[in-house]
Image (cartoon, rainbow, N blue to C red):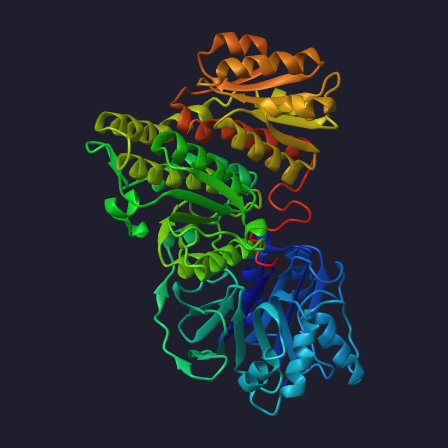
Amino acid sequence: MCGIIAYVGGEPALPRLVDGLRRMEYRGYDSAGVALVVDGSLWIRKNVGRVENLARAVDGGPPGNIGIAHTRWATHGGITQPNAHPHVDTDQRIAVVHNGIVENMNALKAQLLADGVEFRSETDTEIFAHLIRRAYKGDPQAAVASALKHIRGTYGLAVAFADHPGLLVAARNGSPLVIGLGDGETIIASDPQAIVAHTRRVIYLQDREIATITREGANVHHMEDGTEIGREIELLDNDYGLAERGGFEHFMLKEIHEQSESIERALRGRIQVREGNAKLGGLEMSPRDLRAVARVIMIGCGTSYHAGLTAALAIEDLARVPARAEIASEFRHRHPIVPPDAAFFAISQSGETADTLGAVQEIMLKGGDVHGVVNVVGSTIARTCGKGVYVYSGPEIAVASTKAFTSQVTAMLVFTLMLARTRNLSLEQGQRVAQALLGVPDKVREYLAAPGPVQKAAEIVANARYVQFLGRGYSYPVALEGALKLKEIAYIPCEGYPSGEMKHGPIAMLEQGTPVIMVAPRGSQRDKAISNLREVQARGARVILVHSAGDDELRDMADLSIPVPATSEFVSPLLTVIPLQMLAYEVARKLGRDIDKPRNLAKSVTVE
């Protein structure tokens, strides 16, 4: 999940490389480094910490016009200057930046040590530099291809050679790389966000492909047989140019406030109110295909898994089709059963999540029908599935995902309406569902205009040793998501549970003053929620309640209540989750946390 950027062209490389690292810092911010080819030698600088540390260290650096750079999220080896990328061979003539995992690192390192190679770092990446040096006979691409034959694992790789001051080599297997084609300059990056300031014309490397990069463009080849590949040039979406804070203190706060627009985009052109139906053309599913679906299985990690849980509840409730959500990292490794009559949905904001991609590949290997639900156009999961749904939430820079969750849930609710209309949902019922969906963006705006006593709730939670989140039915995944957000950015121990499970163990964690965040909008399980509220209060807990506006009875029972606009039960997660996002943000702010870049986390998990 590190960030890779490389440049070759007619302009000074260093400013472009540092700017690219800044744009990708959400992918990793333990350390950063840069290597330039200058006067036949490699000029290298590396620093622990944020990109700004590196930027200060290289200010006034040489005007070379070719180089590679990297911002790291540590996997192999601690957070130290020697472990920062780029890594070089013994003679410091070949420099490598890498995202991925070398699974056979120990065996390869033992072989190289036996050959007399001295390692400067604890990383798996350094192995690439030494293997490439051993294979190098004057042809950079041939040397990289030869070295990669020994590698078992994943990589996105950019390599610079001191002997070739106008050429870079890139290779990919399981970790994303995109090549931007500018006017007399070419850029390699692990994220289109680093390219868009210079060009929107790109080609995407696919697995087991290698490319020689010059200022004139890229020559792409199959890694196994060296066959040249003609790759179609694509245009980056305009949204990639929007990754600025726009007056907000943090990207997370900005992205919370963008949710009315992102939900609107996820609905636009897809809801057919008159027909009480919806259309997702990217699914390539006719009514007959939908009728043939016997079950629906969502695959995801973290926030995307919680979105899948929400979708599963709606699918069973409205369409009466068996549905469930699976954690991708567990699903892919347990020899799963892949029913031929199931529709699988792989949910991932980035479209690059390694475990979800692995699950997709396993489903396809077993003959399953899998669709991507992704935000990033051209991402690996989107390309691998070949069909699915773009959620159109726009760039999400904060590590803690907010608008991606609501966009994913929205897109899956659109699918639910399609599926339900082929089953038991009447025209009139379908129209009500369609209208409820279309009404969500305005309700989100209404809530964000008057978010309630979130600041008071944050004061209670910020001093807590432990926090419990509870919800029933559609509110259970919201409780999980609220707990995840608080863990991610405030580092407060907390758990999310179904309210009914609270008596089966978690209630033992409650003591006098323990904050309990209960999500209880008006719905079918409201009365049960009241019972749970009284149970936790009887143990001395302080209840912070998220509820439907106008539910005065429930409001008066809580120690602190945060109302959200009333809506249909199945769309309630799109509203009730927002106060929990705001709460996590305000608690983290009070505690002085690094909100957009929380410790030990990065935005896109592209390694296992």
Q: Position of residue 465 (x, y in %)?
A: 75, 28
Residue beneath the point at 66% across and 13% down? 537
- Residue at 64% over, 49% down: 601
The residue sitting at 65% across, 37% down in the picture is 487
Q: Quadrant of residue 114?
A: bottom right
Provide residue 578's location: percent of width, then percent of height: 50, 30
> Among all residues in the image, which is located at the extreme bottom?
137
* Left or right: where 438 falls relative to 4: left
**Which of the pair 196/543 is nearer the observer?**
543
Question: Considering depth in this image, is 286 or 84 the residue closer to the camera?
Answer: 286
128 up-or-down from 240: above or below: below
Does residue 268 appear left or right of residue 253 in this picture? left
Front residue of this view, candidates 164 and 524? 524
Q: Residue at x 56, y 18 (%)?
A: 545
Picture quadrant of residue 354: bottom right
The percent coordinates of residue 407 (x first, y second) are 42, 40
Badge count = 0
Q: Nearer the viewer, residue 497 or 84?
A: 497
Task: Answer above or below: position of 497 versus 146.
Answer: above
Residue lying at the far left of the rendered structure: 274
Q: Quadrant of the N terminus?
A: bottom right
Instruction: Quadrant for the C terminus, please.
Output: bottom right
The x, y position of residue 185, in whole percent, is 45, 74
- Can you see residue 359? yes
Q: Is residue 264 visible?
A: no
Classify residue 121 by image quadrant: bottom right
